[in-house]
Amino acid sequence: MKPPPLLRLRPGTPVLSRGGGQVQCGSDPRWSFVLSGLTPGEETWLEEIAERRHVTVEQSAARCGVPAERRDEIMTALFRAGVLVPVPGTVGVVTAQADGAADATVLGMLRPDGAGLATLADRARRVVGIVGLGRLGTAVALHLATAGVGGLLLHDPLPVQVTDVGLGGLRAVDVGQARDDAVRSLLAERSPRVTVRVDSSRAGGAGLDPTDLDVVVVTEPHAAHPARYRRLLGLGVPHLPVVVREADVVVGPFVRPGRSACVTCVDLAHADADREWPALATQLRKVAEPTHEATLAAVAAATAAGQVLAQLDGHRPAAVGACLEISLPAGLPRARPAEPHPRCGCVVLPA
Ligand SMILES: [Zn+2]
């Protein structure tokens, strides 16, 4: 693998001296890389390319007296390790068109080409539907807007409650207004570059028109209602249920229609484990919605938004084939596997 002509240090990579002719690039164990047997001039060169980004790697090598042959050898090793990446422009012209530009360096760490701005440009073209806008759903909306998602379609015609105020950003003045209208106003202030629409169809099911949506997040109380997700499943729209229970929240499964366990699969597994489950679920749907406790809402909103962004960015969300359970007082997401159920038929299982 021959390096392309124009390279730079992957943005955000710390270059650290280990002494004895060793230099370590990066501190994350997934990709940190140690070069050994370096001369003092070569060490200075590597430290300089981390500090002086307006000078090319080659100019810096010449200034530190590193011979061309040795320079090329070290650059090839660093390129293969992913420490050197192509300079922007050789990966296509990209700009961050929405919010999220602050995230470019970190997002670049997850890409072979280091081009975090390309991830942001892609997010800016995506639209996410959010159904249910209490504290938790509102926090998901704000998180996705801050992360640079270009469009949000909101649905929750219920009035803002006093208990919705605070985390997520709804204010005392919003109480009594339709939640989706209130969140749209909030986003217009906080993230004016995001296109926000309110779905006024007030339709049944998941509650919004899923056409052209990349992902739909549905927050609901007590137990996910399989019927609400049938249309999304049928149209092949990826979706994520977020279920608020007494003192925990379940994020998932993230449903890739036809490719991973769906809400009905999980419901059928629940009924296998407890034959009274269908009757209990029917009763639960009549119980008042639990309030969204601050820690649970914060952790669950960040977890849910992280799943959506992983999907948009082309990674596999951790909640595909799993329910992430977050309970108090620990507040840590714990994954419980969710397999396709043979009686559901949403995924073609091997014979
Ligand atoms: Zn299924």
Image (cartoon, grey):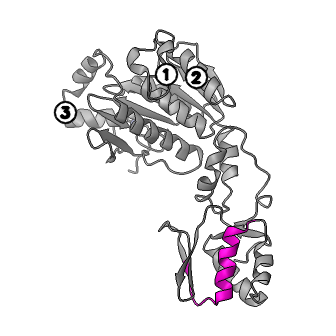
Name the residue beneath numbered marker 1.
170
Q: Amino acid at mark 1?
A: Leu
Does residue 330 show up? yes
Q: Residue at x 70, y 85 (%)?
A: 73
Q: Nearer the viewer, residue 4 or 108?
A: 108
Looking at marks 3 and 1 on the same chain, the residue that comes earlier in the sequence is marked by 1
Q: Residue at x 52, y 37 (%)?
A: 238
Q: Is mark 2 within 8 Å of ligand 1?
A: no
Looking at marks 2 and 3 on the same chain, the residue that comes earlier in the sequence is marked by 2
Choose mark 3 or mark 1, whichever is in front.
1
Return the mark for residue 186.
Answer: 2
Q: Tell me the element at label 1.
A: loop
Return the mark for residue 274.
Answer: 3
| Percent position of residue 223, x then y | 32, 27
**Dots 2, 1 in contact, CB < 8 A:** yes
Q: Residue at x 50, y 50 (%)?
A: 316
Magenta-drawn segment: 34-53
| Percent position of residue 133, x then y | 47, 22
Q: Nearer the viewer, residue 15 or 34?
A: 15
Q: How many residues crowd mark 2 within 10 Å: few (<14), some (14–19), many (20+)?
A: some
Classify residue 211 by image quadrant: top right
